[in-house]
Image (tube, coloured by chain):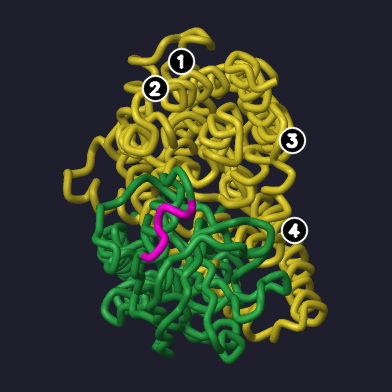
Chain colours: A green, B yellow
């Protein structure tokens, strides 16, 4: 018992310092995600307030942990229910390590793992006029429609990244976006078929703004409403790269 | 005595951490192989992994913090006797009480584990704690609301409530009658029984001191549980980066297979219970109704990250039961729903 109590003196102090350092680090990391806008790469904006709460709680816990380590040990010992060892601290530091070492990026073409879906995700959103509709809005319209020919001649203006499969027709590709309901755990790639005069020019993963008209036509095995492009513009990745169902 | 037992825990934890580190190393090697074989630059695969991991972590960590603080507050402000006083004595009653306790402590699956462990430490019966652990991530006002918004008041919403309560209560009674507390719970979840009563007289402290104490405990709780959340998020992110979603989706037909695959998907995706309804909507056209209900009932009970967090509370054999029993029972429920709705 006495030997163990001696153990508690200096090493536990250092551990308490490490704990509060990590807690501060986490709080600052979350705050930076919000301030830099990089948070949009990871979670749905709807839940940004949760990250604000998280950042504040981390700072509070960092301060109380620091405060606890400065107080005389006699009292603290009684409350020391867990033995937090260095290996635990290393594991908990892992997210910070990853955040510092690897530049923050949204999911893009490299994350498409097994195809891009032609079906919409989530419940019906806000009704928008045709030119304001994004890829998700359009897939919802298609899902509701009785026949793909219903949209023939309608003008579209959509932004997404190029996705290709060998089965796509000449000049054809899919303009894709990731949807995100909650966080990247549920990110799901969806897309609209596009046919353009010089469609081969565009490399997979490139972000494009495509203007054109819809026409029901064959794309692979199915008859689908397809965007026949009049204008294609190379654009930067949008500040909010995901679509929120 | 207490300190020597802490030493022993530390040793087994270290072994477990070494095992998990090995697993992580194997999966990291898998990233390398995938990059090599699919000719994806390994930096890109690593970048996708980092985005997926940090996304899951950032979304889950506020809930873990709230759960840790709730745990700290329970420790300092609620007397062990209080919980016992209001809870039914018999096993079935305690399990039923536990299944509805989420209405009082609204926590999702990242926050539920520290709260459940605190309840155990406070002397809660096994059946109560297990039912709470399995049911609370869905049985709380926030998730009721999100499920209602997504599916309305229909078969999915009602099915989710019935299946969740049924499975949680039955598993809780089975695990509760299987063995003694000490054989079910890890020593660290029992510490309260020898430790708290003897040393910590929280009653004597002022409210401010109690609050400080609660927050200090919450900080430790965060590290204790956070490491399991982090390992779980690593595994979930690796699975999502390496296993094509399509390969699961294409197998999901038939009244029973569809349920099996939706449950595996729920386990692998490890999506937070507060939003899984919106995700499930994506599968409504592809999968049977029973599969959707099972996805929604099983996912919040058990997934990759909560399994790892369970290992911080229960003995290993019990963790196995806590994963397999809900899996089998949700599967049965899903199959029955499909039969009733005539999918067979």
Residue B83 placement, left or right of A129: right
Magenta-tinted stretch: A148-153
The chain identifier of the residue carrying mark 2 reads B
> Pointer 4: what residue?
B15
Would you say B269 lies left or right of A36 here? right
Q: For numbered disc 2, what is the local secondary structure?
A: helix
Are the residues tagged 1 and 2 within 8 Å (C-beta)?
A: yes
B53 up-or-down from A209: above or below: above
The answer to whether marks 2 and 3 sit on the same chain is yes
Q: Which residue lies at the image location 33% right of the left edge and 15% below the top edge?
A: B86
Circle 3 crowding by C-alpha within 10 Å: few under 14, some 14–19, many from 20 = few
Determine whether A145 is above or below A57 in the image: above
Label 2 and label 3: CA atoms lie apart by: 26 Å
Quarter placement of the N terminus of chain B: top right
- Mark 3 and mark 4: span between their CA atoms? 16 Å
Q: Are marks 3 and 4 on the same chain?
A: yes
Residue B49, image x, y percentages:
60, 72
Residue drawn at (77%, 74%), measured in percent from left and top? B34
Q: Marks 3 and 1, Cα distance to the nearest angstrom?
A: 24 Å
Q: Which residue is mark 1?
A: B96
- Which residue has dot 2 on it? B100
């Amino acid at each position: 018992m006495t030997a163990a109590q001696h153990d508690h003196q200096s090493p536990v102090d250092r551990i308490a310092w490490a704990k509060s350092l990590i807690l501060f680090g986490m709080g600052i990391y979350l705050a930076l995600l919000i301030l830099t806008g990089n948070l949009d790469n990871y979670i749905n904006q709807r839940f940004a307030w949760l990250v604000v709460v998280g950042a504040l709680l981390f700072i509070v816990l960092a301060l109380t942990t620091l405060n606890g380590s400065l107080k005389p040990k006699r009292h603290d010992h009684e409350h020391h229910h867990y033995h937090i060892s260095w290996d635990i601290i290393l594991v908990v530091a892992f997210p910070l390590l990853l955040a510092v070492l690897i530049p923050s990026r949204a999911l893009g073409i490299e994350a498409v793992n097994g195809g891009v879906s032609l079906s919409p995700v989530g419940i019906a959103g806000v009704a928008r006029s045709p030119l304001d509709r994004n890829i998700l809005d359009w897939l919802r319209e298609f899902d509701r429609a009785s026949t793909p020919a219903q949209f023939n001649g309608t003008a579209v203006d959509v932004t997404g990244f190029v996705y290709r499969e060998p089965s796509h027709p000449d000049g054809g590709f899919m303009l894709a976006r990731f949807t995100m309901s909650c966080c990247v755990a549920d990110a799901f790639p969806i897309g609209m078929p596009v046919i353009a005069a010089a469609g081969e020019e565009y490399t997979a993963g490139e972000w494009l703004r495509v203007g054109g008209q819809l026409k029901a036509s064959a794309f692979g095995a199915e008859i689908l409403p397809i965007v026949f492009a009049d204008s294609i513009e190379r654009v930067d990745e949008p500040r909010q790269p995901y679509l929120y169902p | 005595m207490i300190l020597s037992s802490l030493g022993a825990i530390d040793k087994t934890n270290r072994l477990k951490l070494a095992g998990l580190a090995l697993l992580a190393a194997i999966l990291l090697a898998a990233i390398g192989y995938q990059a090599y074989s699919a000719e994806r630059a390994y930096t890109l695969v690593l970048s996708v992994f980092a985005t997926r991991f940090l996304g899951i972590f950032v979304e889950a960590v506020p809930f873990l913090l709230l759960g840790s603080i709730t745990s700290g507050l329970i420790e300092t402000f609620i007397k062990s006797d209080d919980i016992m006083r209001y809870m039914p004595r018999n096993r079935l009653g305690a399990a039923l009480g536990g299944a509805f306790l989420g209405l009082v402590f609204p926590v999702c699956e990242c926050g539920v584990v520290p709260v459940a462990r605190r309840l155990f430490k406070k002397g809660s019966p096994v059946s109560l704690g297990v039912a709470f652990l399995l049911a609370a991530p869905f049985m709380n006002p926030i998730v009721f609301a999100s499920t209602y918004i997504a599916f309305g008041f229909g078969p999915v919403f009602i099915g989710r409530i019935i299946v969740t309560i049924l499975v949680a209560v039955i598993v809780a009674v089975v695990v509760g009658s299987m063995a003694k507390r000490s054989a079910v719970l890890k020593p660290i979840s029992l510490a309260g029984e020898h430790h708290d009563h003897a040393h910590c007289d929280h009653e004597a402290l002022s409210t401010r001191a109690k609050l400080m104490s609660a927050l200090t405990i919450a900080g430790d709780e965060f590290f204790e549980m956070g490491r399991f959340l982090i390992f779980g998020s690593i595994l979930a992110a690796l699975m999502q980066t390496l296993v094509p979603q399509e390969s699961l989706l294409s197998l999901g037909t038939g009244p029973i297979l569809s349920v099996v695959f939706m449950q595996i998907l729920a386990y692998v995706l490890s999506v937070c219970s507060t939003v899984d309804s919106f995700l499930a909507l994506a599968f409504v056209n592809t999968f049977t109704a029973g599969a959707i209900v099972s996805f929604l009932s099983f996912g919040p009970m058990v997934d990759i990250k909560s399994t790892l967090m369970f290992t911080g509370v229960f003995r290993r054999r019990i963790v196995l039961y806590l994963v397999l029993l809900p899996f089998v029972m949700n599967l049965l429920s899903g199959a029955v729903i499909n039969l009733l709705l005539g999918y067979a």
